[in-house]
Image (cartoon, rainbow, N blue to C red):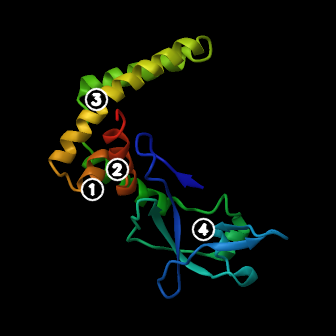
Amino acid sequence: MSWQREGFETHEGEVGVLLADGSEPGPVFFDLGSGAYFHESTDWWVYDGSLRRPTATSMRGKCACGWRGERTVPLDWEQVLRAGREAYDISGPERDWEAHMDDVATGAVPLPDDVAGLLRTLRGRLDELVDDEPLLVLRAAEEMEAIVADFGPIAARYIAGDAVPLPRLAEALGTTEKAAGARMAHYRYLNR
């Protein structure tokens, strides 16, 4: 189970676990039979110590951007077995991730109210039309792509000219450094 916040899709959160020594374990691999493919998982509940897997002793929030929650919550495997993993309380790590996301949102460059309002209105209107008028929605998507193709490269050139460091760019966009770098490369070479 993972958590996402609209507008910040690269910041996918989930429950992370720690071993008794305080280290974060690597993925658990599952041999599903013959073949070269091994399924892997980092879901918190696979670290229950069964089948020679590591045993997690605590959990915390974690994010795809690399953030890890400072607060840890003890894991009670007997309670997990009694309640079932779906019913086990993971609200502490989720609240910590939500607080992290509040920080991410605060650091992101806010859209002007009029632009944010226009985008909300456009998204709502397209949502109303997509089932009955998919051609119209596709035409609107084409118009939006043309706007992006016009202004994205200009903005990317200004940002590159100002030598905005990648960590600052990622913070301003509310995304990860990897995603910010990819977005810059996409826009810088969009019209070439």
Q: Mark 1 points at which residue?
A: 166
Q: Name the residue under label 3.
A: 151
Q: Is residue 151 above or below residue 22?
A: above
Q: How far apart are marks 1 and 2 (CA)?
A: 7 Å
Pick the residue in front: 144 or 146. 146
Q: Are marks 1 and 3 in contact (CB under 8 Å)?
A: no
Badge 1 element: helix
Q: In this view, does 96 lie above or below 109?
A: below
Q: Which residue is drawn at 52% across and 16% down?
A: 137
Q: Earlier in the sequence, mark 4 or mark 3?
A: 4
Q: How far apart are marks 3 and 2 (CA)?
A: 17 Å
Q: Which residue is drawn at 69% across and 73% down?
A: 29
Q: Are marks 1 and 4 in contact (CB under 8 Å)?
A: no
**Residue 161 at x, y = what percent?**
16, 46
Q: Which residue is drawn at 31% across and 41% down?
A: 188
In the drawing, what numbered circle is on residue 180? Answer: 2
- The picture quadrant where one finds residue 153 is top left
**Residue 5 at x, y = what percent?**
45, 45
- The picture quadrant where one finds residue 176 is bottom left
**Residue 90 at x, y = what percent?**
55, 62
